[in-house]
Structures are given as C-alpha cells and as structure tokens.
Image (tube, helix red, strand yellow):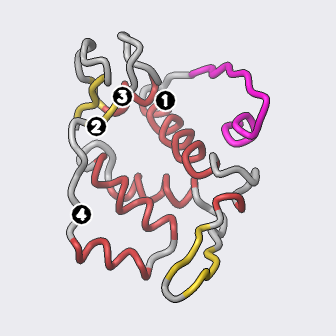
Amino acid sequence: MLFYSTNLIAAPVPFDEALLKGLAPDKGLFMPEYVPRMEKEEILALTDMEYPEIAFRVTRKFLHGVITDEELLAITEDAYDYEVPLEHVYDRNYVMRLDQGPTASFKDFAARMMARLMQYYLKQNNRKLLILTATSGDTGSAIA
C-alpha cells in the first residue's frame, strides 16, 4: 500500500518512507491510499482479544506484505506490553483507559507503536535517526 500527501502534490510513497519522513515534501500529511475493509466477523472476533492482538489485526490490514505477520506481532506485543484497562460504564459499554499507559498519556498508544515501527525499519536498513522535538506537555514523555 502506498501513502499519499493530503496536499496531493508529492508522489505517493511506501509506508517506511512515510513513517520515517513524517511530513510529505509538499508539507502535507501522509494518508493511506485506501482504508482496508474489516468484515463483520473480523470485528466481532476482536472482542475476545487483548489489545496487542487487536492492534496487530488492525495494523496488518495496512501493512500486509510489508512486514511479516511474525515481525508485526512481535512489534505490537512489544509496543503494548502493559495492561490496557477497560472500565464498565453501563450495559455493554466500556471505556478504554488511555491514561493508564506507561507515561499516563493517551499518546502512549500511538507513540510507542510508531517508535517500534521506526526501530524496525532503521534496523532493517542499518540506519540511525535523531528525532529532536520540543514539548511542554505529555508528548515528550510518551515518545521518549
């Protein structure tokens, strides 16, 4: 799957390039060329899974053929190696406690996966990357 810029000027790129660049050369955000479909049965099966397995199943839809299932499962299990609490609200409604990650920030859920995917691609290509960022809030601790 290729990823295109929201400004529609830059040429579409593969996932690893979009991930490591962050922004497209035309200053747009990278988006997948399509959102893969999940069948009703696939969605219903997620209800009995732990978060790392759910993340794997959803992410695999976007990265199928780019990262092997074994490698992607290892990445998701490493990124989400902590308990993700669900709180019962009423009936069949629950709230996922995004503030219960390692840094108590909802950003743990995206930042940790992003970091693990970056590590994977950098290692594959024997590259290093320095990310310099400034923050006044919880973003810094989530991506550190």
Disc on res. 11: none
The image quadrant of residue 140 is top right
Instruction: Mark 1 or mark 4: name the one nearer the start of the chain.
Output: 4
- For mark 2, what is the residue? 32
Would residue 142 be counted in the magenta stretch?
A: yes
- Label 3 crowding class (10 Å Cα cut-off): few <14, some 14-19, many 20+? many
On residue 122, the disc is 1
Do labels 3 and 4 touch, CB within 8 Å?
no
Picture residue at 28% right of the left edge, 54% below the top: 61
Image-based side of 33 in relation to 98, left or right: left
Q: CA distance from mark 1 to mark 4?
A: 30 Å
Distance from Cα at disc 4 to Cα at disc 2:
15 Å
**Reading the chain from its start, which is encountered first: label 3 or label 1?**
3
Camera-nearest label, 1 or 2: 2
Residue 130 occupies quadrant:
top right
- Residue 46 is left or right of residue 93, and the answer is left
Q: 16 or 30, which is in the foreground?
A: 30
- Three-letter residue code for mark 1: Leu
Q: In the rendered structure, which amino acid carries the disc numbered 2?
A: Pro
According to the picture, the residue beneath numbered tag 4 turns out to be 38
Residue at the image point whose x is 21% and y is 42% from the top:
34
Q: Which residues are magenta?
A: 129-144
- Whole-percent x and y of residue 57? 35, 62
Of the residues under marks 1 and 2, which one precedes in the sequence? Answer: 2
